[in-house]
């Protein structure tokens, strides 16, 4: 590579003008840090290099060239792109699952370890008369009609929070009519 024109032989055509500008500025004494540029490897693989261009001076301080220090960040950029794509895919899946839960024909609710409601689908709202925005963040046990059942329900929730399933367990909620008045079970 010694004796070859850096810009013409190694810089991608779309970056030649900007790299030439960076090198010319360095020749006038203006340094450039963290400039991303695409280059070709010997095997013609496209690389992304983070370049710093510094003015090179002689003993009297006269500009005699440019020192370029670069770091190949191709893999870092590829990993960042893969991570971004994976996050976008995960976000799409999460949104699809949230829509599925919300529109399911079965009543579905979720609670955190403090028994605060974190999920409340449309069917729960229809059955209880309580809208999602009215119940999120509230303790599930406070919504139950029969306070005597709270202990057994708390036990079932404890089991669920540690991964032990309970099938076909009935819950009784304080239901509301369309005006928000308590309507029973």
Image (tube, grey):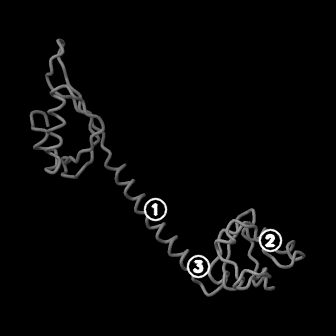
Q: Residue furthest right?
A: 148
Quadrant assignment, res 116: bottom right
| Residue tagged 1 | 87
- Give the structural element (helix, strand or loop) at label 2: helix
Vertical arrangement, residue 56 with respect to residue 88, above or below: above
Q: Name the residue under label 3.
A: 102
**Image-quadrant location for residue 8:** top left
Earlier in the chain: of badge 1 and badge 3, it is 1
User: Residue 140 versus residue 88: which sits nearer the camera?
Assistant: 140
Secondary structure of residue under mark 1: helix
Residue 49 on image: x %, y % = 27, 43
Is 170 displayed left or right of 37 in the figure?
A: right
User: Whole-percent x and y of residue 19?
Assistant: 17, 41
Q: Indicate left or right for 19 with 161 as reference.
A: left
x and y, in percent, of residue 66 in the image: 18, 28
Q: Is residue 121 above or below residue 24?
A: below
Residue at position x 87%, y 71% in the image: 151
Pointers 1 and 2 in contact (CB under 8 A)? no
Residue found 19% across the figure and 50% down from its top: 43
Q: Nearer the viewer, residue 185 or 55?
A: 185
Residue toward you, 153 or 181:
181
The residue located at (17%, 12%) in the rendering is: 60
Image quadrant where one finds the N terminus: top left
Which residue is more in the foreground, 152 or 73?
152
Alpha carbons under labels 1 and 3: distance apart: 22 Å
Q: Residue 141 carries which label?
A: 2
- Relative to 163, does residue 44 appear above or below in the rendering? above
Name the outermost residue toward the bottom.
105
| N-terminal-most mark, 3 or 2 | 3
Residue contact at pointers 1 and 3, CB within 8 angstroms: no
């Amino acid at each position: 590579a010694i004796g070859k024109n850096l810009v013409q032989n190694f810089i991608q055509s779309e970056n030649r003008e900007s790299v030439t500008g960076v090198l010319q500025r360095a020749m006038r004494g203006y340094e450039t840090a963290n400039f991303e540029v695409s280059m070709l490897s010997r095997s013609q693989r496209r690389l992304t290099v983070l370049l710093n261009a510094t003015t090179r001076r002689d003993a009297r301080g006269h500009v005699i060239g440019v020192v370029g220090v670069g770091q190949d960040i191709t893999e870092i950029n590829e990993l960042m792109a893969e991570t971004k794509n994976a996050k976008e895919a995960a976000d799409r899946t999460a949104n699809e699952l949230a829509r599925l839960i919300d529109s399911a024909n079965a009543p579905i609710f979720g609670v955190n370890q403090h028994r605060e409601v974190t999920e409340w689908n449309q069917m729960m709202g229809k059955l209880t008369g309580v809208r999602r925005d009215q119940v999120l963040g509230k303790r599930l046990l406070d919504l139950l009609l029969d306070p005597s059942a709270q202990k057994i329900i708390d036990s079932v929730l404890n089991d669920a929070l540690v991964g032990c399933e309970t099938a076909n367990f009935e819950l009784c909620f304080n239901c509301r009519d369309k005006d928000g008045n308590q309507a029973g079970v």
